Amino acid sequence: MGNKEKAKERRENRLQQIRLLRTIPYSEHQRWWSKETVAVVTGGNRGIGFEICRQLAAHGLTVILTSRDASAGVEAIKVLKEDGLDLIYHQLDIGDSSSINQFVNWLQENYGGLDILVNNAGVNFNLGSDNSVENARKVVETNYYGTKSMIEAMIPLLKPSTVGAHIVNVSSRLGRLNGRRNRISNAALRDKLSDVESLSEELIDNTLSTFLQQVEDGSWTSGGWPQNYTDYSLSKLAVNAFTRLTARKLSERPVGQKVCVNCYCPGWVRTALTGYAGNNTVEEGADTGVWLALLSDQTTTGKFFAERREINF
């Protein structure tokens, strides 16, 4: 059996284990949440975001499904209602500061804040072997800066809790710093981005600014950037880095005001984002995100997960 076959077998075995875990209900001791627990999910109208909304609502939380396209979001709510799930909808464009501000005001006025934020909204314009950077700015602005804006806007609204509030960022292994393939070739830059103690917004933003400048002048192909889905990979690398940075900044909060900030890779899921060409179902892709959102362990923060296991950044 070759390495690819072995890896495929390991992945399938792990997914079988997760399917089994999903059939085991949470015990009363594990269930720290109630109907009063508010979860906000961005990009919830389809794919992984829709499934995360569905699973969280099935666990009994108050789920606010958001989407850029209001008609698509309302339709998603109708579909979930037909399944016996009652969710709330609000329009939200994470790339529009005024939309975020309107949502903040509405959320504070109607719910007093939130307990869980799942940043799922994102875009990708490359499929198969394509690697165009024609939409690189849109990808970076949505996937990274949009996610960053949501985190910064929501942190003041996170409710105090004995188990801590939760921020879950949907990311990708494509954004790993030290993967064997598809990584930044500049070792010095990788080292800087790997050092969580010296990591800064300035370093993350400058890295993306350099890439986008090279896209504009046409020199990006020799810039040492990831070779596959370059713009998407870099946007998710930035999300991963900002996850670690935010977790570090919030780590000194006292008990009762803790915030757990983690990111995860859902795998290659059969959704519109992958052209429906993935290996995993949306149920499998959403599972680790829901699991992280419902964790009661306050020490789990600033980490990267896949299939309910921690992986390296």
Image (spheres, rainbow, N blue to C red):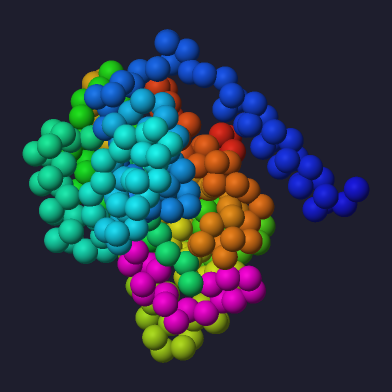
Question: At 61% across and 64% down in the image, what residue appears?
Answer: 182
Residue at coordinates 56% horizontally, 34% vertically from top-left? 308
Does the rendering let one see residue 81? Answer: yes
Q: Which residues are magenta?
A: 126-142
Is residue 151 at all visible to an observer of this figure?
no
71 on left or right of 19: left
- Residue 310 percent location from the top left of the image: 55, 37
Residue farthest to the bottom?
Answer: 217
Q: Does residue 131 appear to the left or right of 196 in the view shown?
A: right
Place of residue 163 in the rendered image (x, y in percent of width and height, measured from the top left) = 32, 21
Q: Any magenta on residue 233?
A: no
Instruction: Examine the rendered structure and indicate whether residue 131 appears above or below residue 203.
Output: below
* Image height of 31 relative to 200, above or below: above
Q: Residue furthest top?
A: 29
Total marks in image: 0
* Left or right: 310 as drawn, with respect to 139: right
Q: Quadrant of residue 244?
A: top left
